[in-house]
Image (cartoon, rainbow, N blue to C red):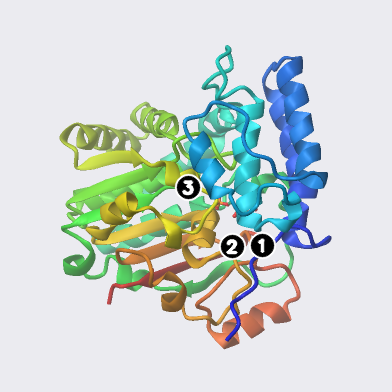
Amino acid sequence: MSPAPTIRSDVPGSFPWSVFHERHPRLVQQVLDALPYGPAERAAVEDLLAESTTGLLRPLTDDGDDHGLWLEWGRDVWGTPWGEAPFLWAESYFYRRLLAATGYFGSGAWRGVDPFAPFKDAELAGPAVDEELAALGELRGLAPEQRTEALLASALWGNRADLSFGLTAAPVAGRPPGLVTDDSRLLFAAPAAAGRGRVCLVADNAGRELLPDLLLVDHLLTEALAAEVVLYVKPYPYYVSDATMADVLAALRRLRSSPEPEAGQAGLRLWQAMHTRRLVVRTHPFFCAPLPYREMPPDLRTEFAGAAVTILKGDLNYRRLVGDQLWPAITPFADAAGHFPSPVAALRTLKSDVVVGLDERVVADLDAYGTPWRTSGTHALIQVHGLS
Ligand SMILES: O=P(O)(O)OC[C@H]1O[C@](O)(CO)[C@@H](O)[C@@H]1O
């Protein structure tokens, strides 16, 4: 059987092409409008936009600690047009270069300034978060299993609140949104299998996704569905709203300062769990690598290997888990995700062409509506491998 083609961004009209030619120009404009960058940063950002649509891939010229890593990660693509590199590679590199262009890795005053912070801050302070935290009170009367279900659903659909995605996503008519496949019963149904050990959660977006992720973590710890949780975040700002340690702290502060008692108490418990190391936040350079998890370095593989289960949040983590390739959608999830060193669960709303593990009839049904269900964010999935 020939391998599934690797997705590239050089096909006009395709989803990856629209990311580079429609989404990125809007993103760049928003970044330049949101902070008072000087002429050097503005020119570097504009140059990057032009280079990423018409130019060749060239190595980093900044002094980031990851300089050597990227040199190595790009050994097969330097000198090729951006569109001819794998989409995963080129899109990841775009975000790395955007940070450099804004001075994030430089020695000047913009060093360490998150160019996406204005969007993240606005989201976290916004009324949608107030409403979501107020709704927590409704969980009070539920049985623990029902709370697990509700918090899992909230962490799953929180993935829809992705700030880069919001730039071009339009409402889609057609089949009502929903889960295209759902293995959630395997996840925490059997505490003996998933709980009591270490649960790893690889976070995706900050703000409206990270808050429900943290509430799920609190529930796992409180209900002894996990003895400890390791939350993995990005080492630097990435894909617009991806969570960093600074975003974890902002989310914890938001919880702790909420007038909603359930939220405030959860925030306090999470804070204390960090004191006692029942909750540990970690990062690794590989979380910003433009590569699939199949190629993760041995130290990270060892960390995951001891976990009862690793939960991977979001679309980008899914692409990295199964490989950013045009798989037939009915490819078994186990074939694509079986390489992961621990039992693994993917919680993701569908925002790119990649999907595996679907039932043939579900695919036929979704296709019959003629709407872009793979990329519109209207559908979601929970897939589990290694737990029964
Ligand atoms: O935040 P998430 O769920 O990882 O989504 C990121 C996704 O957004 C895009 O950058 C554009 O939709 C995808 O290419 C990428 O997979």
In the picture shown, does residue 312 fall above or below 383? above
- Look at the image and tell me in which quarter the N terminus lies: bottom right
Which residue is the site of mark 1?
375
Mark 1 or mark 3: name the one nearer the start of the chain.
3
Q: Residue at x 73, y 62 (%)?
A: 172
Instruction: Identify the amino acid type marked 3.
Output: Asp
Where, quadrant-wise, is the C terminus in this rendering? bottom left
Q: Nearer the viewer, residue 93 or 255?
A: 93
Inter-mark Cα distance, 1 to 3: 17 Å
For disc 3, does the CB lie below 8 Å from ligand 1?
yes
Foreground residue among 226 and 231: 231
Q: Which badge, 2 or 3, is on the more N-terminal residue?
A: 3
User: Which x, y percent locates residue 43?
Assistant: 78, 24
Q: Which mark is residue 204?
A: 3
- The crowd level at tag 2 (other Cα within 10 Å; few <14, some 14-19, many 20+) is many
Regarding residue 171, the answer to whether it shows in the image is no
Mark 2 and mark 1 in contact (Cβ < 8 Å)?
A: yes
Q: SS of the residue at dot 2?
A: loop
Q: Is residue 271 above or below residue 184?
A: above
Residue where numbered disc 2 is placed: 350
Decide: is 352 above or below 357: above
The reply to whether residue 256 is visible in this rendering is: yes
